[in-house]
Amino acid sequence: MKPRKNLGNIAIVAVAVVAFGAFVLLATKGGKHHSNLSAVAPTTTLKRVTTTTEEPTTTTTVFVEDTTTTAPAPVTTVATTTATTVKHTTTTKKPTTTTTVASPSGPVTEHTDNSASFTHGSDGSFSASATQPPSGADPFRFTIKTAAGGGVSGDTASVKFTVTMDNQSGKSVAFPDNNIVVTVTLHTSGGSDIVFTMTASNQAPLKSGEAITLSQTRDVSGYGTFDATATCDVNYG
């Protein structure tokens, strides 16, 4: 009886082993199947692409003309000196004896050979006069005269001053730095002297026989009589 019982136990163990093997086989095949699916299944990745479109930019250049606005400048009345050079022409019909007038040498301050005056009345009247220079030979005749300028307004009179320098020497007469500066002095009976200048720039030396005239119109305030004289620095060559 023991041998049959042992055979039965062996059969049961064999069946159990076969069943366990079948179970393991099925489990193994199933795992491989799922592994294959995982390897074969494709993976799709979606990537968002953003496209930016820039509108073309148009640049327009506009040229604008600059406009400068200048405020009107204040008007200032300035006395202007006018200079005129005259060359004397001498016509000789017969031979004559020429006498040279003695003249200084080097730098000299010349004074007018006469004086001029004008009278301005409180009633608006105006008159002018001048004395005569001395007669006789003069190497450098220097004279002054006055006249009405642009009229009278209240206590102010417009006066024209004229000076003439005539080179009668046998030398040329030059001016410092080629600039003529005539200093005019107005003498008044009841007040201080009035001093002003008359100028001419870039003036070439006066040759013998040449003369130059300077004129200036300016306003003079006050009533009464004014006497005018003048001086000028020259250089005898």
Image: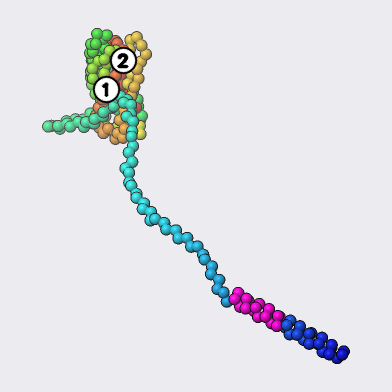
What residue do we see at 59% from left, 76% from top? 37
Quadrant that contains the C terminus:
top left
Q: Residue furthest front?
A: 1
Residue farthest to the right?
A: 2
Dividing the picture into quarters, in which one does residue 209 lie? top left
Instruction: Evaluate whether residue 132 shows in this view.
Output: no
Mark 1, Cα crowd under 10 Å, few <14 / some 14-19 / many 20+, is many
Q: Do the numbered discs 1 and 2 sit on residues whose CB atoms are within 8 Å?
A: no
Residue highlighted by disc 1? 217
Q: Look at the image and tell me whether residue 18 can be seen.
A: yes
Q: What percent of the width, then of the height, locates residue 125? A: 23, 11
Region rendered in magenta: 22-38
Which of the 4 image quarters holds residue 207? top left
Q: Residue tagged by mark 2?
A: 221
Q: Position of residue 157 (x, y in %)?
A: 27, 16
**Coordinates of residue 20 in the picture (x, y in percent):** 74, 81
Question: Is residue 147 placed above or below 6 in the rendered structure?
Answer: above
Horizontal side of 105 relative to 125 (left or right) equals: right
Q: Is residue 63 magenta?
A: no
Q: Position of residue 130 (x, y in %)?
A: 24, 16
Examine the rendered structure and indicate whether residue 83 appears above or below residue 229. Answer: below
In the image, 120 versus 52, the foreground residue is 52
